Image: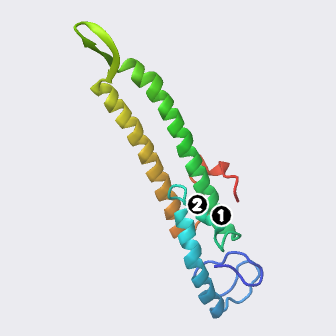
Amino acid sequence: MYCSSCGRKIAKGSHFCDSCGAKVETDYKESSNVSSGQSMVIKVLSYIGILWIAGLFCGDKDEKDVKFHVGQGIMLSISVFVLEIILEIVKQVVVFSLFRTEQTLFGYGLGVYKISSVGLVVIGILYGALGLYTLIMAVIGIRNVLNDEEKQLPIIGKFAFYK
């Protein structure tokens, strides 16, 4: 909720603005709750895949807190994309080089390769770690939205350029 006089954030349940001392009006609280419902959905969507795009085109796109969470969601998407590229390079160079065997027919190589079970386990662990990273970061972001906090995501949040 924000003060109608100075525009600063007001703590929940406050009757006066901590910044300017203006009285918080009941009508303001009710109208704020209506608009915050839509912006709450947009802020939560910001952490789910590329649904942060909704925040770029919604009616609340100029609100500071919506911009903050959309920016964090953009950074999450960018970091997952970069990690997927790195993971694909690792998969191609390391896993396919070390953990593959060539199919043979009567002792002659066919040029067809099979990934060993160890290679498949390594790939599964790497992709599982990427999925876990994505899930943890999304949960942290959504928790921040639900707690009405503007905390940056760990490690990547400080690089957000959309504010």
From the image, which quarter does the N terminus lie in?
Answer: bottom right
The structure residue drawn at horizontal position 65% and vertical position 67%, both measured from the top left corner, is 57
The structure residue drawn at horizontal position 38% and vertical position 33%, both measured from the top left corner, is 123
Q: How is the image coloured?
A: rainbow
Whole-percent x, y for residue 143 in the image? 49, 63
Inspect this view and state whether residue 132 appears: yes
Whole-percent x, y for residue 2 in the image? 68, 79
The structure residue drawn at horizontal position 72% and vertical position 75%, both measured from the top left corner, is 8
Q: What separation in Å lies between label 2 and label 1 (alpha carbons)? A: 7 Å
Name the disc covering residue 82, or none: none
Q: Considering only vertical position in the picture, is 123 above or below 30?
A: above
Mark 1 lies on residue: 56
Q: Considering only vertical position in the picture, is 62 above or below 46?
A: below
Which secondary structure, mark 1? helix
The structure residue drawn at horizontal position 41% and vertical position 19%, both measured from the top left corner, is 97
Whole-percent x, y for residue 11 in the image? 62, 77
User: Contact, CB < 8 Å: mark 2 with mark 1?
Assistant: yes
How many other residues sit within 10 Å of disc 1, few (<14), some (14-19) or many (≥20)? some
How many other residues sit within 10 Å of disc 2, few (<14), some (14-19) or many (≥20)? many
Callout 2, which amino acid? Trp
Which residue is the extreme one toward the left?
106
Inspect this view and state whether residue 147 appears: no
Mark 2 lies on residue: 52
Callout 1, which amino acid? Leu
Does residue 80 appear to the left or right of 66 in the view shown?
left
Q: Quadrant of residue 115?
A: top left
